[in-house]
Image (cartoon, helix red, strand yellow):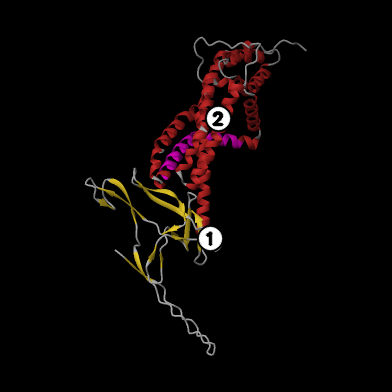
């Protein structure tokens, strides 16, 4: 058998040279796509076909490579671009690997944090981003320093690309992958809209979340710009992947929260009960039936309100509830601790006008007041003890009327 290279091999060698400025993995993928077509053309031309015959049918290898660039969305070669010669020393894979896995870890972290924030509808959960932002910045710095080609040439990336290539060749898997690929243009817009909706939801839940809204808007604009350009510039994966992971995590968390809410609405509500539980922030609270209790007032037999009352259950455990107070600097209600001492001052939030007059509804500056005392009076029914005679039967106790309360203004 002759070792003389065939026309296809010679033609593809020149195509490879014309594409030398692209990542090696990208070049192999392009050549694998066009090699079957060139082999069919060579068979059609007959055995012993020359390179000139392929050039007559397809054009020069350089022009053919330019067409492949345009169809794949790759940038044109820069002036003076030269083929990178192989060196005898093997490049280090440490920095490219840290860049790759830093991206993977930060994307997974963003997805988990978005999931938690969507489930609890609590913007404070997003503070956990501080653990993953340094990882992402290190990854991005190593990418910009070493280039994306080194990352794309990693064995794990090559393996993944080969796995996807095999999947495209299979009929069913290929259909799914092509369908997912067709959704890319719409996916970037969906990501932007989801980020905006997520920010508005958190803002309605907690007004301080308005500070997050500009960052989410910037992230949405970035994904709309970078998404369609990822194929031609793989560096933009460091924008597309984290934002997409955040959106997917938030979407799954929102779906879980909706299912949980529907389940709670459909659950059976039993008789009135008196039990401790926790609110959405994990703070202790006390419910009586379906109503949350924030304060407890105790009276003696004469109807006199008691102060400094400490509550315990039947096992001697303190019934502690979250205590709130006024934060003077911001004029808002803030958590100050937990205890089992009752009653507590009532927290009244409002605003004050420019003259300092308090107004619960209209004004200009936020204000908070702690008001002591009991907001109502209680009429305690008198209980008459039954006579203690052994000869006569004990009369049945009569039901006393429920205590009545008179609100005080």
Question: Which quarter of the picture shows residue 88?
Answer: top right
The answer to whether residue 249 is seen in the rendering is yes
Q: Which residues are magenta?
A: 175-201
Visible residue check, residue 59? no
Q: What quarter of the picture does the N terminus occupy?
A: top right
In the rendered image, residue 244, in percent from the top left (x then y), is placed at: 51, 35
Return the x and y of residue 112 as percentages of the image width and height.
54, 40
Quadrant in which residue 306 is drawn: bottom left
Compared to residue 374, the image places residue 155 above or below, namely above
Q: Main secondary structure of the magenta part?
A: helix
Question: What residue is shown with label 2?
Answer: 103
Label 1: which secondary element: loop
Circle 2 packing at 10 Å, graded few (<14), some (14-19), many (20+), is many
Q: Is residue 366 above or below residue 188?
A: below
The verdict on residue 200 being magenta is yes
Identify the residue at image location x=34%, y=62%.
Answer: 375
Q: Which residue is mark 1?
A: 267
Q: Residue at x 62, y 14 (%)?
A: 54
Residue 233 image point, x, y percent: 51, 23
Q: Is residue 265 magenta?
A: no
* Residues at marks 1 and 2, CA–CA distance in whole angstroms: 42 Å
Residue 140: % across, % down: 52, 25
- Relative horizontal placement of residue 358, taking residue 95 as reference (left or right): left
Above or below for 85 versus 167: above
On the image, which quarter does residue 199 sit in?
Answer: top left
Tell me the SS state at disc 2: helix
**N-terminal-most mark, 1 or 2:** 2
Q: Residue furthest bottom?
A: 391
Residue at horizontal 49%, vertical 11%? 79
Closer-to-camera residue (186/38): 186
Vertical side of 173 occupied by 143: above or below: above
């Amino acid at each position: 058998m002759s070792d003389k290279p065939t026309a296809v091999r010679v033609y593809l060698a020149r195509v490879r040279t014309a594409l030398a400025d692209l990542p090696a993995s990208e070049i192999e993928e392009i050549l694998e796509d066009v090699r079957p077509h060139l082999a069919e053309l060579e068979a059609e031309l007959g055995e012993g076909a020359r390179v000139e015959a392929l050039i007559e049918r397809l054009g020069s290898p350089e022009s053919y490579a330019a067409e492949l660039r345009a169809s794949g969305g790759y940038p044109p070669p820069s002036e003076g671009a030269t083929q990178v010669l192989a060196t005898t020393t093997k490049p280090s894979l440490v920095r490219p690997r840290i860049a790759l896995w830093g991206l993977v870890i930060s994307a997974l972290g963003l997805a988990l944090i978005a999931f938690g924030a969507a489930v609890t509808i609590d913007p404070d959960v997003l503070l956990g981003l501080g653990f993953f932002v340094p990882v992402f910045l290190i990854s991005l710095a190593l990418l910009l320093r070493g280039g994306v080609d080194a990352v794309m040439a990693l064995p794990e990336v090559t393996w993944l690309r080969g796995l996807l290539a095999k999947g495209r060749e299979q009929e069913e898997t290929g259909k799914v992958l092509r369908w997912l690929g067709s959704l890319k243009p719409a996916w970037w817009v969906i990501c932007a809209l989801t980020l905006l909706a997520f920010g508005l939801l958190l803002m309605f839940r907690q007004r301080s979340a308005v500070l997050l809204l500009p960052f989410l808007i910037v992230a949405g604009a970035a994904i709309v710009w970078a998404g369609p350009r990822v194929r031609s510039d793989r560096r933009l994966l460091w924008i597309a992947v984290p934002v997409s992971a955040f959106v997917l995590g938030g979407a799954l968390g929102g779906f879980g929260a909706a299912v949980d809410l529907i389940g709670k609405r459909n659950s059976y509500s039993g008789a009135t009960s008196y039990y401790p539980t926790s609110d959405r922030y994990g703070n202790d609270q006390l419910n009586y039936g379906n109503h949350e209790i924030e304060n407890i007032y105790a009276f003696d037999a004469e109807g006199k309100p008691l102060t400094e009352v400490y509550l315990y259950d039947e096992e001697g455990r303190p019934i502690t509830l979250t205590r709130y107070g006024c934060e003077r600097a911001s004029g808002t209600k803030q958590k100050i601790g937990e205890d089992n001492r009752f009653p507590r001052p009532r927290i009244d939030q409002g605003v004050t006008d420019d003259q300092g007059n308090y107004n619960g509804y209209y004004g200009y500056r936020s204000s908070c007041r702690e008001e002591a005392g009991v907001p109502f009076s209680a009429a305690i029914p008198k209980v008459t003890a039954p006579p203690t005679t052994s000869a006569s039967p004990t009369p049945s106790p009569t039901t006393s009327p429920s205590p009545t309360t008179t609100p005080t203004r």
